[in-house]
Structures are given as C-alpha cells and as structure tokens.
Amino acid sequence: MADGVPARYWGVARSGDGWRARLWAPGATRVAVEIDGTRHDLARDADDRFEGYLAAPAGSLYRLVVDDAPMVDPASRAQPHGLFGPSALVDLSGFRWQHDRPGRPWHEAVISEIHIGTFTPEGTFAAAADRLEGLVELGITAIELMPLNQIPGQHGWGYDTALPFAPHHAYGTPEDLCRLVDRAHGLGLMVLLDVVYNHFGPEGVDLHRIAPPFFDQTRSTPWGAAIDFTKEPVRDFYRANALMWLTEYRIDGFRFDATHQIQDPSDIHILDEISAAARAAVDGPVYLVAEDERNDTALRETGMLDAHWNDDYHHAIHCALTGEAESYYRSFAVDPIADLLLALRSGQVRQGQERAGSDIARGKPSGHLPPCAFVNSNQTHDQVGNRALGERLVALAGDPATRATHAMLLCLPFVPMLFMGEERGETRPFQFFADPGEDLAQAYRDGRRAEFAGFSAFAGATVPDPTSPATRDASRLGWADDDRARGWLDLTRRCLAFRREHVVPRVASGLVGDPEAWRTGQRSIAAEWRFAAGRLRIAANLGALPDTPPDWSPDLSEGDPALSPFAFAVST
C-alpha cells in the first residue's frame, strides 16, 4: 500500500498532495477521470492498467469515462448520492481515532450479528454507535456487521454487492463508520465485517463492461456471474478491499460469505492470500470466519480461518423445536436430538457420513478441532430472513423453548452468536428486502414468491413484497422496554456473566479428553467437557422431562430440568 494507494490496479486514492487514479480496463482504448467537467486522461501500461495523477480537494465528485462512456469507479470509496451518482474522493488519514483495537482473544467472543439499516429506527452508523453500550453491559464482546458495501437504492441486506469499497450511502459517511468502529473499540467490542467476495449483485456493476475478464465466463454462482481469481488484477481487487477495511476502518476481522462459491485453482487460494495479507497488515489479532456449506475442516486446521459458522448446530436446534422437515432441514428432522448430541461432542454434524434424508455425503470429521473453531447460533440473518415470512424462532417455538436453548447457546464452550434483538427476545420478523430499479423489481417479487411455492409450511401465506419499504420497516428492531424484554435481558446477562467467569477460563485452558454427550430421555440430553481448568456439564430438556434428571446442583438454570419440559442447567 505504498504512497497511500490501496491497490495496484484499482481506485483513486490519496498520494502526496494529490490523488493517484488506477483502473484495470482490458480492451479499452481511453480512460479518463472527470472532475468538475474536466477530463484527466490516464496512461495505459502493458498490463492493461490505466494510471494518472490528479489534483483536487478531498470530497470532490468524479466519474470514470471509459471510451467516452461514463462509468462508476468499481473501487469507489463513497457514493454520496447513491449507486448511480458520482463517486467522492475519500481520505481517512486525518481521522482522529480515540481508541486502540481491543485485541481480545477469540475464546472471549460473544457475537451480536447486526444489520445497520434495521438495528435502529434511524438505520445509520451514528444511531448504531449509540446502542452499543447496552450490548456491552449484557456481556457481548463482538459485533458482526452484515455487509456495508454500496448496494442499489436505499435499503437491502447488502449481499447484492455493487461497489465493495464504498460504505452504503444511506448508512452515513465513511467518517461515520470510523466513529462507529472507534466507539465499539472504546467499549471493548471487536468489530467483524461480513464481506461478499463470491459474486456481485445484478444491478449497477460497471465492471462487466470495464473488465469482462474479471468474470469466469464458464461458471456462474446461484447469485450471478462467477469471479475469475486466477487473474492478478482480480486478486488485487479483493486483497486491497480486505486491507482497506482492516487498516483504514480498523475492522478486527471478517465473516466471508459463501466461501464454497469462491473457486480458485491457483497455487495459492485467494482466501489464503487474503488471510496472510490481513494478518501481516495489522499489529494484533485478526479474526477470520467463513460460511461454507462443505464442512471442510482443512481451512481451520491450517489456521487460515479461525472458525466456521456452524449451521449444523442451528439446524438441529431448529428442527428439535419446530418439527420442520423440508428443504435443507430434511436430514436434521430425522433425529434432531441425536444430531444435537453429535454437535456437542464434535462441533459439526455432517462429517462425511451418509445421512437419512440427504443424498449428499458432506463434510469431514471435526472432533479434533477446538470448540472455538465453531460459531454456533440459534438464529442468523440467513435462517430467519430466508423464511417466507421472516419469523424468528421465538415466534415459532414460544418463550419457554427459546429461553432454554438461548441459555444453552450462551453457556456452551463454542463461540455463541446472537442475531440482533435475540438478547431481548425480539419478536419482530426479519424479512428479505431490497430496493432494485424498476426493471428488476418485478423479478424480485416473482422470484421471492416462487422460492416458497413448494413449501407446505407457507401454503396460503402472502409473501411480503421484498421491494416495499414497509417490508424493511417491519424488520426493524422494536427495542421494547417491558417486563418480557427485561426478563430476556436478565437471562442474557446472567448467562454471559456465568460464561465470563466459568466457561471462558476453561476454554482457554484447553480440552482434556473427548467431550461426552448422551440422551437422558426421548427429548432430553446431558453433556460434559473436561478442561485443564475444570469440568463443565449441562442438562437440557427440549420438549419433555428426562427419564434420568441430573443428580447435581446447577450453578445456573433456566427452568427446572426435573420439572419443566423446556429447561437448561449448567454446572462446573
């Protein structure tokens, strides 16, 4: 990142008293940067890179002009007027940071997954910063921000990526994002960012015209054209993007979206390269987590990744509480209690074995990995928002069941992750919403309805219009302050205090021997882990009383395992 330029092939970045502009545009004959009606031509080199030096004040608006066609800079750092407006020159070198990174060890992680646009009524970085202290008071130690990059329109989940380097304009300015991260760090929170490196969205991506070889024309993903990571300018784009978030916004790590779709036959996989570059760029820990349906343990064994989202744990809990058995829940609905026991012993459920209800043997044995290699959850944006109506688990299973499994999630030795509002028993849905242009809006509506047409659970349901602002508004947290919410907050606070005092030191000391987990009844379980620092044991009822109640006194409980069909207890 010499002389302030974040990439060899991309972007307009501060360089000395001016700005260095770069663009990889194979096939173009002329590229210029237009500022205030004046075009500044860039010179082409042998690598199809166009480069030049500009003088302009920070904040100036500009466009690229490629062979006389106006284009949005693929590495734009800000879009003050939205996706299709001009880009802004951004220089964060003068931002006055007040706090250092917290540098917390990974075994202390308790994550809250947050969507900035619906976390608060305002849906901004500034409003989110004002809510962080309440999360810390509960015992949450990290926030994971759903994608922040510029997307079409005013609202969306963030996965329809258009400009990966620019924070979405509706959330605030780049400086507002810096202030959010700085506030989080001042409170001791780690900040993880969900990044989408496997595809672009269907709208507003001028890269298709600027650099067609950026994409692999022989392959596509479920969400659009595949990316060709064998080309150095493409690798440079994503390497620079990761380094920008880490060094200029002081993000503490990433959740990589759908890494099974990042196919790279290069000698060094792009994720390995990003991992190495990220850890070399930051003085302190950088945490890397992946969503990867393959359940492959290799990336965690080598240390390239710290953890995987453990959807297997979620699916077992969900099927045990709801009885749903369609689509990817099918194999987990056969015996969710048995699957939960396997997850408690070994982390993942799918470990390469054949499973009833599934025609794909997926995964590798994972029992040798430490508990912190798994991020467990009862709810995520995916599992809530990808339902037709976006219902949260509490709306499907009720308070007694979800309170018991909430307590269990927070007291297990795995890394727990909550979906925003879960800590207070939020009942508002989180639905799929987007703000595409009119030429795509109907396709979004039709596609959403077609997605659930074959699901008996949603027969007769009216799928919310994903393009309506009302769907977004219905998904905003309620921030209720009533007896029910206070009861949930008290449960979260008690569980995380227990975790901080008893679970974290044990996990840090390392496992001694293999974990054990067994049935105590048709719908009840017990488990035990032995660590160098001491034992941890649990009992849980997931719908019925046990045949054999625990013979020990709990240090913390939710319900009574001897009397309540939904209950959880933990002891050291």
Image: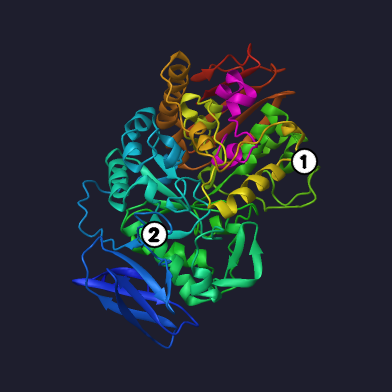
Percent position (x, y) of residue 212?
55, 74
| Label 1 element class | loop
Q: Is residue 212 magenta?
A: no
Name the residue rendered at 72%, 33% in the picture.
458
Disc 1: which residue: 454
Three-letter residue code for mark 1: Gly
Q: In the image, is 230 to the left or to the right of 458?
A: left
**Residue behind mark 2:** 85
Q: Give residue 284's quadrant in the image.
A: bottom left
Give the camera-side residue of 442 and 227: 442
Q: Amino acid at mark 2?
A: Gly
Residue extent of the magenta highlight: 378-405
Q: 10 Å neighbourhood of mark 2: few (<14), some, or many (≥20)? A: some
Q: Are marks 1 and 2 in contact (CB under 8 Å)?
A: no
> Residue 226: x and y, percent?
60, 66
Specify whether residue 358 is in view. Answer: yes
Disc 1 packing (10 Å; few <14; some 14–19; many ≥20): few
Left or right position of 92 against 425: left
Circle 2 — which element? loop
What residue lies at 55% left-to-right and 51% top-to-bottom? 438
Q: Residue furthest bottom?
A: 46
Query: From the viewer's perspective, is residue 525 above or below residue 293?
Result: above
Q: Is residue 397 magenta?
A: yes
